């Protein structure tokens, strides 16, 4: 394997080709669905469009820039998943071996008290039987009663203590029989620590962010003036996210108790599923490394496995046509999803307001980081931007 970082060659195609992308971003800003955004589009290894628009902090009139750092939330997951797969590539981690080898104390049981066998593959694909506290229907759910942290709150416990609490809650289903978005990647982070013999932050730096020169990505943000202020678009004008504020991404779920200050706290435990911060440019380097393959970080065989639907045909809630691979969703049926993306496209997002996708058939990687939840993750903007990108590709094709 080579550890050479992925270069993104600058490209200067006619600007009118990307007017639709800029218009989609501008419309979301003018309609006050977003406060600020950074959008990057790469095709064939060339950076063909980039823009930073709106405010990183509206009240301070601090503009969004390409160097703005964002709280990544679940955009952390593909980074941690890649780190785990680097260990697989090194022969130090087995996808289908039980995780008890590395976490013997982590022994969650089924609802009827039977022991469960969980594999690394099931953690990566969210088929391990775990859940999230924020998905519970009220504030007195099992994870809440156990004091489980989702990795985005102002928690003072350690990663080991959070795993102890998670293990004390019965699994939602027998591993491998269903799919549920979950704290599985936090558990995976603990495995990475055990194998590497370092903190998760140091392990990820050695395995992923260092080799790819993702120098602005980590578990603690050092410069508050570079970090985007978080906003919530649940009113006519998005309001600043308040420390400790709970915001639900879905009807019927109690919601996420946010701590925007957590990213500055070096004592907060490293949440592999939600705890990192970084720039859009850094994350694009990771996506391009995976899209291009060719032995940078991972073999083509492992990258193909990442992009293979691991669910056995199970449907993801509120995502028709999508399955899930090892670290992100995988588009199975573009018609069912009503999407212009190619079958096999990778996609996911982050609760602070992010979305991204990789269409390998089109040699395309797109990153859209915003500071506005949940519009930037699951609002109209996500599909509007997607459609604008594919519209630009059509214009390129007929140019």
Image (tube, helix red, strand yellow):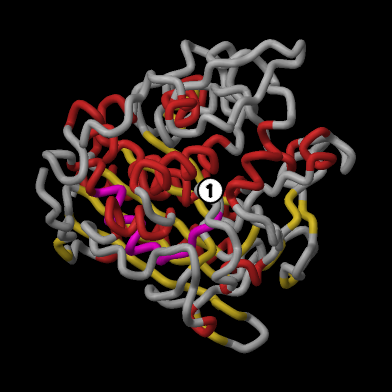
Residue at 33 percent across and 25 percent down: it is 94
Residue at 17 percent across and 55 percent down: it is 6
User: Is residue 245 something one can see in this rendering?
Assistant: yes
Q: Vertically, is 217 above or below 358?
A: below
- Residue position for label 1: 74
108 or 286: nearer the viewer: 108
Q: Quadrant of residue 347?
A: top left
Q: Vertically, is 65 above or below 263?
A: below
Q: How far across and how far down the image is residue 366, in percent? A: 36, 50
Residue 226 vs residue 3: left or right?
Answer: right
Q: How far across and how far down the image is residue 146, in percent? A: 79, 40
Q: Does the magenta portion include 280?
A: yes
Q: How far across and how far down the image is residue 373, in percent? A: 65, 57
Q: Helix or strand or loop: what does disc 1 sit on?
A: helix
- Quarter of the picture holding the N terminus: top left
Q: How far across and how far down the image is residue 177, in percent? A: 57, 11
Residue at 21 percent across and 57 percent down: it is 211
386 or 214: nearer the viewer: 214
User: Is residue 384 something one can see in this rendering?
Assistant: no
Residue 251 vs residue 4: left or right?
Answer: right
Q: Which residues fall within the magenta stretch?
A: 275-288
Magenta-highlighted stretch: main secondary structure?
helix
Q: Residues within 10 Å of mark 1 (few under 14, many from 20)?
A: many
27 or 7: nearer the viewer: 7
Residue 245 vs residue 301: left or right?
Answer: right
Q: Vertically, is 135 above or below 258?
A: above
């Amino acid at each position: 394997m080579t550890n050479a970082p992925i270069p993104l060659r600058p490209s200067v195609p006619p600007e009118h080709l990307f007017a639709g992308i800029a218009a989609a971003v501008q419309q979301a800003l003018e309609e006050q669905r977003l406060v600020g955004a950074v959008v990057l589009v790469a095709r064939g290894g060339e950076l063909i469009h980039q823009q930073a628009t709106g405010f990183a902090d509206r009240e301070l009139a601090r503009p969004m820039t390409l160097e703005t750092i964002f709280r990544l939330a679940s955009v952390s997951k593909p980074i941690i998943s890649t780190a785990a797969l680097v260990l697989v590539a090194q022969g130090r981690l087995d996808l289908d071996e039980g995780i008890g080898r590395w976490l013997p104390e982590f022994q969650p049981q089924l609802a009827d008290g039977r022991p469960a066998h969980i594999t690394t593959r099931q953690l990566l694909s969210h088929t391990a039987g775990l859940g999230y506290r924020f998905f519970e229907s009220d504030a007195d759910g099992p994870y809440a009663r156990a004091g489980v942290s989702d990795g985005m709150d102002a928690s003072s416990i350690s990663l080991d203590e959070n795993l102890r609490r998670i293990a004390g809650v019965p699994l939602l289903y027998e591993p491998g029989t269903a799919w549920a978005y979950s704290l599985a990647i936090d558990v995976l982070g603990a495995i990475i620590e055990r194998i590497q013999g370092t903190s998760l932050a140091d392990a990820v730096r050695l395995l992923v962010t260092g080799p790819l020169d993702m120098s602005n990505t980590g578990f603690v943000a050092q410069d508050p003036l570079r970090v985007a202020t978080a906003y919530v678009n649940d009113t006519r004008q998005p309001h600043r996210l308040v420390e400790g504020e709970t915001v639900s991404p879905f009807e019927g779920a109690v919601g996420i108790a946010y701590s925007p200050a957590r990213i500055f706290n070096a004592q907060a435990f490293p949440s592999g599923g939600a705890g990192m911060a970084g720039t859009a440019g850094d994350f694009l380097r990771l996506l391009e490394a995976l899209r291009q393959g060719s032995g940078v970080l991972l073999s083509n065989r492992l990258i193909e496995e990442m992009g293979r639907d691991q669910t056995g045909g199970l449907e993801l809630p509120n995502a028709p046509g999508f399955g899930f691979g090892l670290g992100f969703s995988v588009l199975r049926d573009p018609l069912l999803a009503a999407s212009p993306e190619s079958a096999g496209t990778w996609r996911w997002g982050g609760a602070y307001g992010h979305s991204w996708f990789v269409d390998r058939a089109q040699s395309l990687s797109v990153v859209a980081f915003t500071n506005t939840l949940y519009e930037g993750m699951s609002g109209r903007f996500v599909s509007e931007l997607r459609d604008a990108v594919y519209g630009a590709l059509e214009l390129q094709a007929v140019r």
